[in-house]
Image (cartoon, helix red, strand yellow):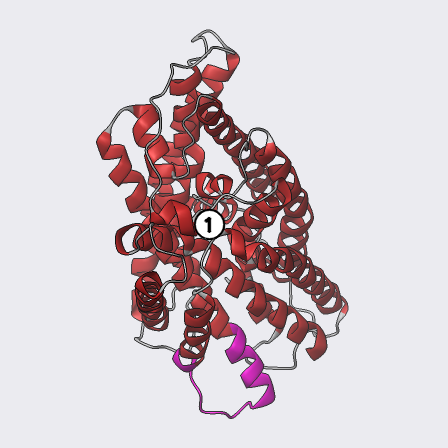
Amino acid sequence: MAEPPKPEPSGRQDAGASFVLESKGQWWHAGYHLTTAIVGPTILTLPYAFRGLGWVPGIFSLTAMGVVSFYSYYLMSLVLDFCEKDGRRHIRFRELAADVLGSGWMFYFVISIQTAINTGISIGTLLLSGECLQIMYKDLSPNGSMELWQFIAMVTGVMMVLSQMPSFHSLRHINLASLLLSFGYTFLVVAASIYAAMSKHAPSRDYSLESAPSHRVFSAFTSISIIASIFGNGILPEIQATLAPPATGKMLKGLVMCYSVILVTFYSVSVSGYYVFGNKSSSNIINNFIPDIGPALAPTWILGGAVVCVLFQLLAIGLVYSQVAFEVMEKKSADPNRGMFSMRNLIPRIVLRSLYMGICGLLAAMLPFFGDINGIVGALGFIPLDFILPMLLYNMTYRPSKSSVMYWMNIVIMFVFTGVGLLGAFSSVRKLVLDADKFKLFSSDVVD
């Protein structure tokens, strides 16, 4: 492997680095953070993604995204490991990209995309949390008058409190619980799917795609964007920053832990859900078990257990994806020479983090397009950060021979995913426009 050029020594740490991205964790803590960032209730969207692809392309796309994303994250960890060995430890994606590529505009490009991802995921988690509460409420009180926006407001209030946990590392125990919860709702959804398939009320299975070729192509690229967003995280350097130095080699162990969980959960949910509901799969597969007309297709205790697991894990995911925003806030507002819990730093933290969560909650209540938002975030956010930039950073850092397989594999992946991202973005925006006639501010129904 070719030796990369030597980077410059790093500068002193600021409050964002000292407080939010404090480096105290072990490799298994990074595994917890990674798993929470990737294996979330968005996997309940996988049967919905399959309905735009069908069986064979769906399983192929899921597998290909898994392999490429693991490879991509591994290359990113190698670049970060090299910088650390050479005395320049990068703890922020934006600073790593700007340094390796030697371009100041990359700093703003990356932070803009990260901000879009963080905000989009925060909105999505609050929206889905509110929907979980609404599902439980409707089961307990079918004729109740409460609406979706009210449940989103409740979850937002809880998140305002939880967001005050000061550092990424302080979430390690919450993220271990999150990992266990992902197994919980996965197995419950699979059990519900088996029950529904054997029920006398089992839905008819139709796996056909859209009849018009153009619509089929657009749906396929929207689905690929959704799968990309589910595998994406966009914050691997920030997660690696939580590791106690030296971090070299630790992230690979964390990745293996994370992808072991992915192997079990992703395939279980996508195959079981799509098998039972086919092209009627909802953007939240749990909704399919509770049809508007007729009895529930699975026992209440199974569905209730799955919804509770999802609800609690969403709190952890919302906290993880808020860390970059909190780090930026802390860097600008906190004084690194004062204590983390000094009044000088505590009051701005409470105000700014609460305000951030409040804005995300308002947008979640106003924009109930969970499936569509997922596709746009995947195409414009996760694909550039997780499937294009890591390959470019590796080639620029290690400078492998242009005759090597690795060099050309990285180039091919970059070009393929650039095309996928552009087409996916167009398809997702198109679907959002088509769904616009269903849009209603503060609607109680999440549009598929």
Quick one: label 1, few (<14), some, or many (20+) residues within 10 Å? many
Tally the numbered discs: 1
Task: Please name whichever residue, 195 or 170, is drawn nearer the observer in this view of the structure.
Answer: 170
Q: Is residue 292 above or below residue 289?
A: below
Q: Is residue 207 above or below residue 192?
A: above
Q: Residue 133 in magenta? A: yes
Q: Residue at x 40, y 31 (%)?
A: 388
The furthest residue to the left: 105
Q: Residue at x 77, y 67 (%)?
A: 198
Left or right relative to 123: residue 39: right
Tell me which amino acid carries mark 1: Ile
Q: Is residue 319 above or below residue 8?
A: below
Left or right relative to 195: residue 10: left
Name the spot of residue 127 as percent of width and height, x first: 43, 68
> Based on the displayed image, in which of its 4 quarters is residue 100 positioned?
top left
Name the spot of residue 165 as percent of width and height, x first: 47, 62
Task: Specify start and end residues of the magenta stretch as a single range.
Answer: 132-150
Task: Please name whichever residue, 338 or 297, is drawn nearer the observer in this view of the structure.
Answer: 338
Q: Which residue is the site of mark 1?
A: 226
Q: Residue 286 in magenta? A: no
Q: Is residue 304 visible?
A: yes
Magenta span: chief secondary structure:
helix
Task: Please name whichever residue, 362 or 199, is drawn nearer the observer in this view of the structure.
Answer: 362
> Based on the displayed image, in which of its 4 quarters is residue 418 positioned?
top left
